[in-house]
Every structure is written in structure tokens, then in C-alpha cells.
Amino acid sequence: MPLRSRVTELNRTNCVEVMLQAFQSNQIVKALVFMPGATDEFYMFHRAKARLMNPNPSLLEAVAALTNQTLIRATFHPPLLLLHTDEDPLEPLIRIVHQPTAEKLRGRNFPPHVLYDDRDWDVLQPVLKKALKMDVRPWRYSYDTYHFYRHSLAGWGLNGWEALEAIALAGKTTVRVENRRLIFEGDERVRATPKLDVFPK
């Protein structure tokens, strides 16, 4: 998967956009997800930069550059490739209250291709509601969503359950699956504090 833009450095102005646009449909990885710890490295702390030595780099080379030169790590949570830091919980917290609804999610298709670059809940909520044919809470413009992280992910061919996992991880939220209803809430879990002394100055 070649990067569409000819870049020599990944940084806060280009990294997320360039990598999400480069992600293509394939048989193994169905979504590329930038988790909140990873986006914070760019947008909040301004400390993530990675040089690309190949003049025509691939997405794989971009992932390797980030993991070798920044605090960002890559973990495959099938079928999602997660870019994260040590603080991000790597397992989505989804509580199933109504099992038949959970089964319906696995059988429903999400839009064939999605790309969300720094999008808030007000963008995601109506997409989830329409695609999954369920009541999705909180509603748009709700005060309860102000602490949700903005979403950065690209996906191909996700089913409803996989999309639910990807969006929960990207926005650092938990999900409760009720009878024809999905309720998102903030995820307060913190796995660990990133070690700042990993790379020599």
C-alpha cells in the first residue's frame, strides 16, 4: 500500500491523513485505527515525528517508522490494526445486555469504505444509527459526548460488530448493547503511562 503523498517526514500536519488515505482493502486487516494516545502524540504533545528514508514509502514503512522513532506502537487486534501508546486500552469494552442484538450487529454491513480523520461524535452517531438500524445514544450535540475523543480511522468491509469495536477504540468509549439500542460512554481506563526516555535525545 503506497503512500499517496510523497512525504519524507510524518508529523502532526500530515501523518494521520496520509496514512488513513493510503489504507486499502485487503484480506487480513479491515481497519486502521489511530487511538487517542497516538493522536495525542501529534496534536496535544507535539512530540511525534518520524523520518521516511524511502523516497516512495509504503504504509508498512510508515508504521515501522512510527514505532521505531516515536512512542506510538502498533498492535493487531483482528481485524483491526491499532496505532496507540502504552496508555491506550487495547481491548474494546462492550457489555452485552441483549444477546440477540449483538448477533444482529455481526450480520449487518457497515458502509463498504469509511475514512474518518479527526471527526467528532456528531459525525459518527448518524452513520451508526443508519447503518446498524438501531437507536444510538448519546444523541448528536449531547453534552455527554464532550469528553469523547475525536475519531481517526479508515476501514473496508467492516461488519456492524467490527465497526462498533473500531469506533469505540478510536473514540475511547465503552458500549452497552441493549435491545435494539447502543449506548456509548467514556472509557476511563488507562493502561500505563508512556515512557518518555525510550529514545535518546
Image (tube, grey):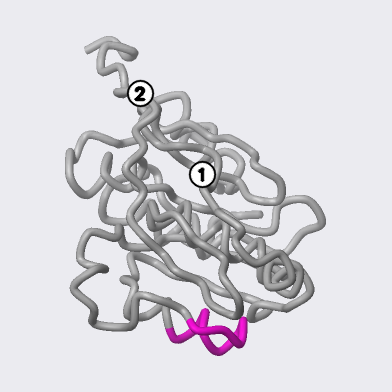
Which sits earlier in the primary sequence, circle 1 or circle 2?
1
Element class at badge 2: loop
Element class at badge 1: loop
Label 1 and label 2: CA atoms lie apart by: 35 Å
Question: Badge 2 is on which residue?
Answer: 192
Q: Which of the 4 image quadrants contains residue 146?
A: bottom left
Question: Badge 1 is on which residue?
Answer: 55
Q: Is residue 176 left or right of residue 112?
A: left
Question: Badges 1 and 2: C-beta atoms under 8 Å apart?
Answer: no
Dot 2, crowdedness within 10 Å: few (<14), some or many (≥20)?
A: few
In the rendered structure, does residue 143 fall within the stretch colored magenta? no
Give me the residue at 78% from left, 51% from top. 28
Count of marks, rendered view: 2
Secondary structure character of the magenta stretch overall: helix
- Residue 86 screen position, x and y as percent: 40, 27
Give me the residue at 57% from left, 64% from top. 164
Give me the residue at 65% from left, 77% from top. 110
Q: Is residue 32 left or right of residue 77?
A: left
Q: Nearer the viewer, residue 128 or 85?
A: 128
Q: Is residue 51 left or right of residue 90?
A: left
Question: Callout 1, which amino acid?
Answer: Pro
- Residue 147 screen position, x and y as percent: 22, 59
Asked if 149 appears above or below 85 in the picture, the reply is below
- Magenta residues? 126-135
Q: Nearer the viewer, residue 146 or 77?
A: 146
